[in-house]
Image (tube, rainbow, N blue to C red):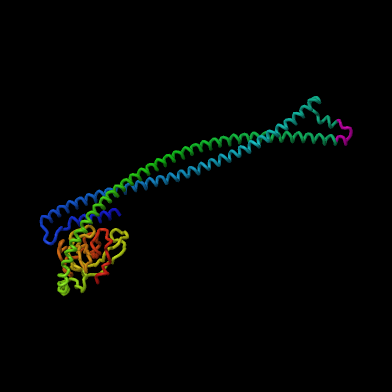
Amino acid sequence: MIKRRWILASFAIVFLLTTVVGETGVLASTLSDLKKEQKQTEQKKRNIKANMDQKSNEIKTNENRIEKILGQISALNKEIEETNANINRVIDKINKTNEEITELKASIADLEKKIAERDVVLRERVRAMQVKGGNVSYIDVLLGANSFADFIDRFSAVSTLMDADRDIMRKQQEDIEQLETEKALVEKKLAELEESKEKLDRLKESLLSKKKEKSGLVDELEAEQEKLKVEKDELEEEYHETIEVEAALEEKVIAEQKRMAELARQEEERKRKAREAAAAANPGNLPKVSNGFWTRPANGRLSSHFGWRTHPIFKTKRQHRGTDIAAPIGTPVVAAADGVVSYAGQMGGYGNVIMITHSSDGQILTSVYGHLSKIGVSTGQVVDKGTRIAASGNTGNSTGPHLHFEIHIGNWTASGPSAVNPLRYVSF
């Protein structure tokens, strides 16, 4: 966008400095001075263009750097997310291990309680034996039976006591073994817990490091973006300066065109008389001169109409301010109406261009003929409708040989709001 506006500003600069101030028969010294000034302006334009191209490349480099930093930040975000997930997994494992340890400690407490209770029972048994004078002999108990029935009763009682003693001892032994196993398991779980906590500390340290690295990249990103903003601001400032110059030059150009328009008014009556003679002449490949004020400027096929379109070179939506007539290079181009040449020379994207100021029933109009291969008139020259003024070509921003033809209400302006569809005036 900046490049396009800069080119338009350049149109105005070149237009002013190549416009011959004065009427037909301008002094050679004035033309020489204007040519020198034009060369100086062209050199200045090339220097500005080179500077803008360099800044555009620097901006592109900055944009690539920013994209790279954004990629690094994106990769770090993934690593941070994965580290957070690992931390959550380790915390879940720690919580689960703590739950298992709590359950084991409860089980151990229960076992210790049972073992302690059995110890009390066993001690009571031992104390009872000691009070009775040593070990109780179950054989003596059996042999002291008074009858077989008493023997059976004593045998049953002895068996019950012996089974109870064995059961108490067995359970006591099993609980002691289970107690040792669960205590060992608690120690193992505590070791795993410590290991998990160390891993958690390492993950948190890694997460902190990645966040610091990300913060550094964000700082670098903001610095690059600030640098990019400064460079863009410089381009904007240069652009606005160019626009200010354009506005001043455009005002002078309009004043000159008004002067040319006055000459056109003075010549209108004389040209009306010569129009019929010019319309009758049709030498070579000159287009047939139409009746009325306007005539077709060149023979050929209409290849592009007035209105919005995708520019064939810049590939952006732009308004096409005229009508294109496809024609081989060298095809004659004639004045579309009587008038005074207000500009003839090279102008940026137009290439070689001619502008003619017309006066019709007191109204000022301007016709434009662009991309010419040859120019046959000069600024200030009075021309008749149908008079050969140039040859079609492919100069400027053109994708093939053709004539670009515009009509403006009033004077031509760089911004182009005065441009109208040529079909309103000319029969193609």
Residue 353, position as x, y percentages in the image: 20, 61
Query: Is residue 234 at all visible to an observer of this figure?
Result: yes
Residue 239, position as x, y percentages in the image: 27, 51
Q: Is residue 195 left or right of residue 336?
A: right
Image quarter hosting the C terminus: bottom left
Span highlighted in magenta in the image = 144-151
- 215 and 414: which one is in front? 414
Query: Is residue 283 at all visible to an observer of this figure?
Result: no
- 95 and 8: which one is in front? 8
In the displayed structure, 428 sits above or below 257; it is below
Disc tally is: 0
Q: Is residue 26 left or right of residue 230?
A: left
Q: Residue at x 68, y 36 (%)?
A: 110
Q: Residue at x 59, y 34 (%)?
A: 187
Residue 392, position as x, y percentages in the image: 20, 65
Image quarter hosting the N terminus: bottom left
In the displayed structure, 383 sits above or below 104; it is below
Outermost residue toward the right?
Answer: 147
Q: Quick check: is 84 in the magenta stretch?
A: no
Residue 167, position as x, y percentages in the image: 74, 36
Report which quarter residue 294 is drawn in.
Answer: bottom left
Q: Residue at x 12, y 55 (%)?
A: 30
Q: Is residue 147 left or right of residue 83?
A: right
Report which quarter residue 190 is drawn in.
Answer: top right
- 188 and 322: which one is in front? 322
